[in-house]
Amino acid sequence: MSELGTKYIFVGGNNKNRIGGSCSILEHKYDAYRRPTRVMFDLGALFAPEYCLDVDAAIPDVRKYLNSETTLAENTIDAMFISHGHEDHIGGYVHLARAGFEMPPTYASKGTLELLKAALEEGGVDIAKWPKMHEVEPGVPVKFDEVEIEAFGVSHSTFGALGYHTLTTINGEPEAGILHPGDYHLGTTRVGEGFNEKQFKDLLSRKLVTNVILDSTSSATDDKYLIDHKEAVANTVEVVKQHPEKQVVSAVISRSIQNLAVDLDAARETGRKVFLDGYWAKKAFRAMQKSGITEFDDIVFRGSASEYKSKYPASQRYIIPSGAFAESKKGKKSGLYKMSEQEKIRPTKNGKKDKNNKARLLGHPDFEVGEDTLILARQRCIEEINGKQVRAMYARLASTGATIVANESEVALGNFQTARMQRSGHASKSETKKMVRTIQDTVENPNDVVYVPTHGNPTQMINTAKAVKSEGANFYFANNLDVLKMGKDKTEKTDEITSEYWIGVCEESDNSTSKQTYTYTLTDENFVVMEEIKKVVRSIARKPSNLKEMSQGKDAR
């Protein structure tokens, strides 16, 4: 008979080398004769290293928690709570749903649910197999037996991001209070609601807090890189106005809506029309619209690229492609990456580029860059994921004669002009300390609160622990696979071990048959393939080429 109490299982996210694959499970045993209540928080993917030719994405191995088409779960999950719609928090959800695993009832904000639905559509998951989805609102608890979860708003680089407080009880008496802000910062947001300090303090004053799971991504970042939305827009506008005759190209991470909003506002202030070139940028924009956010509709062009180019001269263009991370694995090249390869197009004898030349495939199908182009490299690179690729891509773009202005950050992209045009979506060093201070000053039991760093590599999590310690608070380290007992007067590891493996996903497209094959494999922590689990084949659906097609029902649910 298992012991009563609350356990917190770190499944993914506290990785040795790479950020991503966020996933954790709360397990609460409140009755000796009933199975525990289990709640999963996020189910993300991480991008495998370039050297992993057989793995494009990796997912924590959570198969024992999910029913599939052929097996029943060993440890049933009662509910899934999603913090926000980035790939490292929902990518695993989509991959496993495509593979036939049954997702539990899913709770998230309206904006996050729209992004999740868009990802499920894009992933080819039959709508009949989608789980029940429930919109949650800050301050409105959701209860499962003796587990109560209350959401609170946080600021992040996307919209609709939420943190969660989980209260567990035994016979009605509080056992553990676990606060998980998710990916957060303490600044304001342009799109949707963000962090509200007053509401957050109200939650802390009402709830037991025994443990805090704290984001570590940027906890060592200096404050000099912190800017708000208005400053980011003003600085971007200033750069654009220095090059009034040039077309603007600015790649963003598609689901980072707050960063996209900087470009949209800058385009409006400089009298330019935006073309969303990246497919996922269009999907994310539609998710905004379906969430009731329509204030940018007038600034975004809805037609085709050819219509856009014929209607607007270079001086009025503001093009937003995919490719902020230089994505290019296995020939699946992003928009900005394709632009960077255009110089490989072989000229004809008269010196002109031949659109019928097969080498044309190395360039972008609709846009060329050169001396008439201003490229805004606003997205900071994450060194261990894409530093080398991003720098090489911008070096190629510079060789075309394009002017490149990079975001000022702790990581240099090259010898380019810089301007502060974007902030990290994660808490800086001072914001991490302020979060700890706010919690310590508000809860009734500050000396008993234990902080557990998450969402980072070991160095980043050590930086978070240092910030916690500087505020006189307690911390405890946990790695992937660790199971911690949590509650009043206790935070300790158990001898239990979760799965030591990851699930690798490899995607191959065959245009001759219009088929996509997804191969699922079991891998070790270094993403070395051990055995094949499953193959999923689906037809390649034609993607709507522009927002006009999308809004006419091509992506309707």
Image: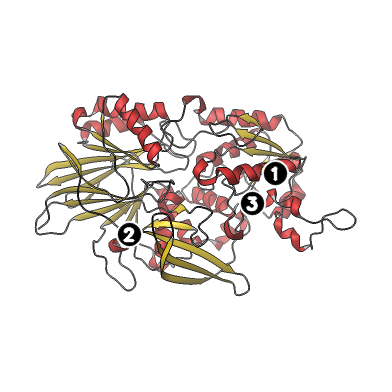
Specify whether 159 is left or right of 509. Answer: left
Residue furthest out toward the right? 350
Instruction: Calculate the distance from the C-alpha at mark 3 to the C-alpha at mark 1.
Output: 12 Å
Which one is nearer the viewer's eye here, 120 or 516?
A: 516
Which residue shows up at 60% across the image and 49% down it?
322
Residue 151: quadrant of the picture:
top left
Image position, residue 541 (x, y; %): 56, 67
Q: Which residue position holds label 2? A: 62
68, above or below 346, in the image: below
Nearer the camera: disc 3 or disc 1: 1
Q: In which quarter of the image is the N terminus?
A: bottom left
Image position, residue 34 (x, y; %): 12, 59
Instruction: Calculate the distance from the C-alpha at mark 3 to the C-alpha at mark 2.
Output: 33 Å
Q: Which of marks 1 and 2 is nearer the N terminus?
A: 2
Which one is nearer the viewer's eye here, 16 or 1?
A: 16
Secondary-structure class at tag 2: loop
Which residue shows up at 59% across the image and 66% down it?
542
Image position, residue 394 (x, y; %): 65, 42
Q: Which of marks 3 and 2 is nearer the N terminus?
A: 2
Residue 343 seen in the figure? yes
Secondary-structure class at tag 1: helix
Specify whether 54 is left or right of 178. Answer: right
Q: How crowded is mark 1: few (under 14 residues within 10 Å), some or many (20 or more)?
A: many
Q: Which residue type does callout 1 highlight? A: Leu
Count of residue discs: 3
Q: Which residue position holds label 1? A: 397
Which residue shows up at 33% across the image and 44% down it?
137
Residue 216 seen in the figure? no
Q: Which residue type does callout 3 highlight? A: Gly
Residue 335 shows which numbered tag? Answer: 3
Colour pattern = secondary structure
Which one is nearer the viewer's eye here, 448 or 385?
A: 385
